[in-house]
Image: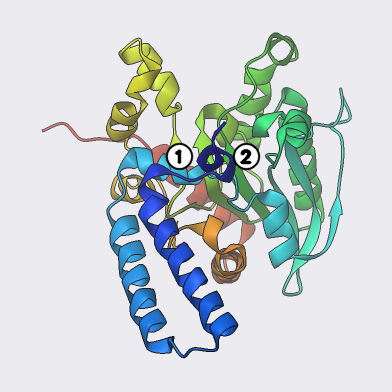
Amino acid sequence: MNDDVKAGVIDFERPIIELEKKIHELKNFTVDERIDLDREIAIMQDKLDKLKSDTYANLTSWQRVQVSRHPTRPYFLDYVRLITSDFIELHGDRCFGDDKALLGGLAKIDGHKVLILGHQKGRDIKENVLRNFGCAHPEGYRKALRLMKLAEKHNLPIISLIDTPGAYPGIGAEERGQAESIARNLLEMSSIKVPILVYVIGEGGSGGALGIGVGDVVIVMENAYYSVISPEGCAAILWKDRAKAADAAQVLKLTAKELKELDLIDEILDEPLGGAHRDHEKAAVFLKSSILTNLKKLLLVSPDERVRIRYEKIRRIGSFEEK
């Protein structure tokens, strides 16, 4: 494995990283040699900012998928640490076990008591095995539903952070009712009376994402994706060749901008220039601000009215007119 792969460097990011390295070296040189090169550094910094802006404004669908999978992108527990206080994780589905790929618990966000749940990936091989690469089992979705029902009982808003390539497709998961557990969540989330805010923070793959994806607002981060299938899976079916993933990403219309144009999501959440993986803290500020803004609006609506609006929004998905 080469150094770029280990560091999670994407091909189109190389010019940016090389320029960042030069600026870093120049700053160190000014300190070591006590030479004033502030003007030169400022010029290079302006060049870097423009390069980042131009590069990330024109990413292809496949490149955004690559950014959504960046190994240093903030995950669920990173956001929990950065935007909440007093987080208490709750475990188990009370039927089979505790899924480590789908976590949830009680927390506070600027004084608002909430239930926050989401998919969790790993940072290394050992943790990825523990977290099953963010692919939840049926017990994960049943745990999520148990916690959402608990939130409804105690009138706590629900914050759902999606980041999964898909639900785990193994034999054991199918034997324990993977499809039923996801379908049950879709049914139950459509009628839960507390506010539900859904954010796709990375990958939003198939039923694995939908299992915690029904909400009053559904928001996708700028470099995240939300799709019925992964680009590789789509390519394997349509072209019998997973190498056609970039073509599949293009036709799937899975980016935040395309989803908003199709009226499948409510908002696009901006990321720091260069992607959330470059600035966890700033990405968390954007996420927290969006949560508080939308929560304030939703709390002004009565529970029955929220459910009615949510249901009507679900029914409009995929509607069309014949002329």
Mark 1 surroundings: few (<14), some (14-19) or many (≥20) residues within 10 A: many
Residue positioned 66% across, 34% down in the render: 134
2 and 1 marks in contact (CB < 8 Å): no
Tag 2 secondary structure? loop
Q: Amino acid at mark 2?
A: Ile
Q: Position of residue 257 (x, y in %)?
A: 33, 51
Tag 1 secondary structure? strand
Image quadrant occupied by the N terminus: top right
Mark 2 → mark 1, Cα distance in angstroms: 13 Å
Residue that sits furthest to the left in the current view: 323
Q: Quadrant of residue 185?
A: top right
Mark 2 surroundings: few (<14), some (14-19) or many (≥20) residues within 10 A: many
Model colouring:
rainbow
136 to 292, vertically: above or below: above
Residue positioned 45% across, 39% down in the render: 226
Residue positioned 79% across, 43% down in the render: 147
Along the viewing direction, whichever of 197 and 136 lies nearer the viewer = 136
Q: Is residue 312 something one can see in this rendering? A: no
Q: Position of residue 2 (x, y in %)?
A: 54, 35
For marks 2 and 1, give the one nearer the viewer. 1
Residue 100 lies left or right of residue 34; in this view the side is right
57 to 160, vertically: above or below: below
Along the viewing direction, whichever of 5 and 78 lies nearer the viewer = 5
Image quadrant occupied by the C terminus: top left
Q: Is residue 148 something one can see in this rendering? A: yes
Q: Amino acid at mark 1?
A: Tyr
* Residue that mark 1 sits on: 226
* Residue that mark 2 sits on: 212
Earlier in the chain: of badge 2 and badge 1, it is 2
Residue positioned 76% across, 74% down in the render: 111
The tag on residue 136 is none
Mark count: 2
